[in-house]
Amino acid sequence: MCCRIWEHGRIEGSEMKTDVNELIESLTGLLEDDDWNVRRDAVRRLGEIGGERVVEPLIRTLGDIDRNVRQRAVEALARIGEPAIEPLIEALDEKDEGEHTKAVAYVFGRIGGERVIEPLLKVLGDTDWDVQNAAAEAFSGIGGLAVEPLIKALEGGDVYMFQGAAWALELIGDERAVLPLIKALEDDDECVRHSAASALGGNIDERAINPLIKALGDEDEDVRQAAACALGGATEDRVIEPLRKALGDECDAVHWSAACALGWSGDEMVIEHLIQALGVDEGGVCTEAAIILREIFDEPAVEPLIAALKDKNVVVRANAAYMLGELGGARAVEPLTEALKDEDGDVRHAAAQALEGDGGGGALICGNAPFETGDTRVVELLRQLLSDSDETVRDAAAGLLRTLRQRSGE
C-alpha cells in the first residue's frame, strides 16, 4: 500500500501498514486525535477503504465537534450505502444528540430508497428544529417514494411530526399532499394550521387558493401571516382583494406579508407599502421588498423611492437611496445629491454609493438613462458639498465630481 506524505505524520505512519484490519484500527485511533485535520483525513481514508468494517467508527464520527469532520463522515457513509443503514438505525436508538442525529438524517437522505423512510420519520418528529429540518431535507432527496408515508404522518396527532412532515412534503412538491394539507387548515391546533398554510405556499395549487384566502381571517396571527405568504405565489385575480384587506391587519407581520404577496402579483397600489417595508429589519421583510421593487416594478417605483428620501424613518431613507442607485437613472441624480446632506451618516453613505456605485456604475452612469454632465444644478450642489463639515460628504462630492469630469472629457 502506498505511503501518503502528510504534514502531521500520523496518517503517513498508518498508511505504511500492510494489513487492512491493522490499518483500520490505526485510523480509528486517529479519530480521537485533538487535531481536526488529523480526524478529517482519517475519516477520508476510512471512506476510501470502505466496506462494513469501517461503518461503526464512521458513525461515531458523525457526532464530532467539527463540521468538516462530520461532513466527511456523512460522505463516506453515503458512499458505503446499504450496508450502513442498519448500524445507522441502531445508532439513532442509542444516541439522542442533535449534531449526531442531524448527520444520520443527512446520510439517510444521501443513501435514499424505501429502507430509510421509517427511521427518518422518527427523526422528523424531533422537537429540535435543526434536526427536524435535516430530516425534511433528507426526505426531499428521497422524493415520491416518501409521499404516502409522510401524508400518513400528518394524521398521527403529533404536532411536531406534523410540522416536519408538512415541511418535507412542501420540499418534495407532490400534488398528492395538497388535499391533506387543505384539510389541516381546519385543525383545532394553530401550530398545525400554520404549518399547513406554510406548506401549501411552497408549490401553490389552484385547489388551495380559496382555503388560504379563508385562512387570512384565522384567529391566530401566525396562521394569517403564513396564509398571506402562501398566496404570494398565486397569480389569480381573486387573491388581490383579500390581500388588500389584509394590509389593514392589526398584526405587522400579516401586513408586511400581504404587501409582499401583492407585490409579487404586480399590484402597483402596494409600492408605497413595499417602500415602507424597506425599514423593517425582521423576518427577511426588507430583503424581499427590495427584490420585489427591483424585479417586479422597476420604473413605477422610482418616483415613490425619490419621495422616500424624505421619509422620517432613517432606514427607509438609506435603503431607498441604495435602490435608486439601481433603478433611478438620471431622474435620481439630483435627489440623491441632495441626500448627501442628510442629517444621518448612513443615508449620506447610501446616497454616495448610489450615485457612483462600485467603480462608477451608479446613478451617474446609468446605461438606460445617462446623466447629462452639463446639468449645472447637480454640479453646483456637489461643489457646495466640497466644504461640508462631514468628511464623508466631502469625499463623496469630490469623487462624484471627478466622475463627471472624466465623462465630459476634461
Image (cartoon, rainbow, N blue to C red):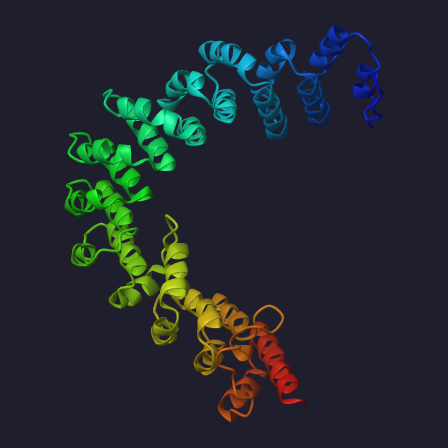
Report whether 182 appears left or right of 355: left
Whether residue 94 is situated above or below residue 77 in the rendered picture:
above
Residue 255 drawn at (x, y percent) = 24, 54
Front residue of 213/49: it is 49
Front residue of 368/390: it is 368
Count of numbered badges drawn on the protein: 0
Quarter of the picture containing the C terminus is bottom right
**Residue at figure coordinates x 41%, y 20% from the top left:** 120
Residue 170 drawn at (x, y percent) = 34, 36
**Residue at figure coordinates x 63%, y 30% from the top left:** 68
Report whether 274 appears left or right of 137: left
Quarter of the picture containing the N terminus is top right
Q: Is residue 190 visible?
A: no
Report whether 2 appears left or right of 121: right
**Residue at figure coordinates x 72%, y 24% from the top left:** 41
Quarter-of-image position of residue 158: top left
Quarter-of-image position of residue 181: top left
Whether residue 365 is situated above or below residue 265 in the rendered picture:
below
Front residue of 138/363: it is 138
Whether residue 286 is situated above or below residue 75 in the rendered picture:
below
Q: Is residue 259 visible?
A: yes
Residue 222 drawn at (x, y percent) = 24, 41
Residue 192 drawn at (x, y percent) = 24, 31
Whether residue 42 is situated above or below residue 134 in the rendered picture:
above
